[in-house]
Image (spheres, rainbow, N blue to C red):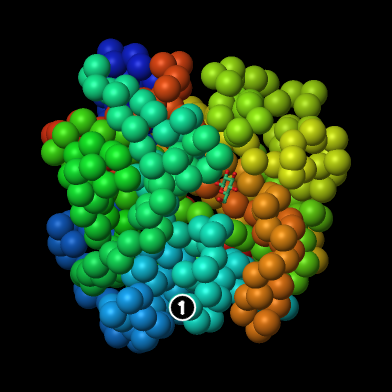
Amino acid sequence: MTNSLLCGPRRPFLGILVALLATLAPAVAGPDTTTNAPAATNDATAGGPAPFSSDTVTKSYFGRFARTPVTLYTLTNQNGMSVSIMDYGATITSIRVPDRNGKFDDVVLGFDKFAPYLKMKDYFGATVGRYGNRIAAGKFTLDKATYQLAINNGPNALHGGLRGFDKRMWNAESFASDVPAIRFTYLSKDGEEGYPGNLFVSVTFSLDEQNELRISYHATTDKPTVLNLVNHSYFNLGGAGSGTILDDLVTLHANQFTPVDDTLIPTGEIKDVAGTPYDFRQPTAVGAHIKELKDKPQGYDFNYVLNKGFFSNWSLAAVVEDPATGRRMEVSTDQPGIQFYSGNFLTGSYVGRERKRYPQYGALCLETQHFPDSPNHDNFPTTILRPGDDFQSSTVYAFSVEK
Ligand code: BGC
């Protein structure tokens, strides 16, 4: 089973019909429908593409996790855009892109040394799992067995538990690719943080000449389990540490969102954004309605239900535009949801690159994902992965400038 079924609503016959129609009607579905699977050009098994050259993926020593050396891999394209990822947490530490004057800046929060990552509690750039976002009381029932996960966020489980995927060493693998790319793999053991099943997971990062960063996930299990893999980059298109993102214009292609209780667990409702301060269907400054929000700390921290077409799960999910620098980012994904988080819990306590502080609202996250607490809501798309299933999912972050 591929994730097109895993992602879809619980209507198997409709799902099969849709999948069939999608394969029969590629012209109608458009070229992006192929992107539910990892890009063929980045897949070693696809054959053909030349191996990347050493000057497009560089390796450097980043620090030490206990006795293990942590390595930083930097992908660079011919436009000079670069993305650095370390093997600890398969974490993006840096994304450098030009502004409208050709000036390069780092547009994600991060540190230039490894040590601060060990103290940082906000998942900067990390690959989050086994279950990104929250599970109520860290509890769920699957095939009549009840599982208790590690609790690490008030009464709930957040982002995979006390030591989720973000705090693990991943194995890095290079492979034949016609664009700079690197793959990380991790075996999450049966019972780790309370989750059932040995889960083998890989995440591949690739950077093309259109300044598109693609993140592709793949996972298999030997027992039924739940899965929600998320990248937790904090973006500030003005440059990390340049101030807040309150003036950035955000568009979310979502007519609905999933309201939460005061511990940030979905109530189960799926509500229209129309007429609420949560409406980002048109480009809207993050700060435009933020003062109307009752949440504490004030700000956006919601899962939006992405609008999807009939033929494909692939969709443009979000756009961010930074009027000051002209930088623009488009986020496309096959996932059903996106967590729009406006950095409400940041306090200015982190001193990042170039000794710049990261204040509240100093960045925003657009975490493509399944809905929080799905294992406890039958009306949400399923997150169950079973032996024999082949979970595949991709998200693309595309960078450009507006003159
Ligand atoms: C969550 C926030 C949380 C942040 C950092 C986001 O994905 O939605 O509630 O504070 O991650 O942990």
Q: Toward the viewer: 184 or 283?
A: 184
Q: For this rendering, which residue is in front, 263 or 396?
A: 263
| Mark 1 beta carbon near ligand 1 (under 8 Å) | no
Residue 43, above or below 197? below
Residue where numbered disc 1 is placed: 114
Residue at screen point 39% across, 72% down: 86
Which residue shows up at 78% across the image and 27% down it? 276
Q: How many marks?
A: 1
77 over 396 or under it: above or below: below
Residue at coordinates 45% horizontally, 74% vertically from top-left? 84
Q: Residues within 10 Å of mark 1 (few under 14, many from 20)?
A: many
Residue 310 appears in view: no
Where residue 130 sits, quadrant-wise, is top left
106 with respect to 86 (left or right): right
Visible residue check, residue 250: yes
Q: Is residue 271 above or below residue 40?
A: above
Quarter of the image that includes the C terminus: bottom right
Task: Provide residue 321's location: percent of width, then percent of height.
Answer: 71, 56
Amino acid type assigned to the residue bearing label 1 in the image: Phe
Q: Is 216 displayed left or right of 84 in the figure?
A: left
Residue situated in front as seen by the camera: 360 or 43: 360
Please state the horizontal and vertical placement of residue 222, each as a whole percent of the image.
13, 38
- Residue 202 percent location from the top left of the image: 27, 55
Identify which residue is drawn at 20% across, 49% down: 189
Q: Relative to the observer, which residue lies in front, 247 or 269?
A: 269
Q: Position of residue 238 (x, y in %)?
A: 72, 68
Give the SS element for disc 1: loop
Instruction: Please state, as top left, top right, bottom left or bottom right, where the N terminus lies in the image.
Output: top left
User: Residue 289 sits in which quadrant?
Assistant: top right
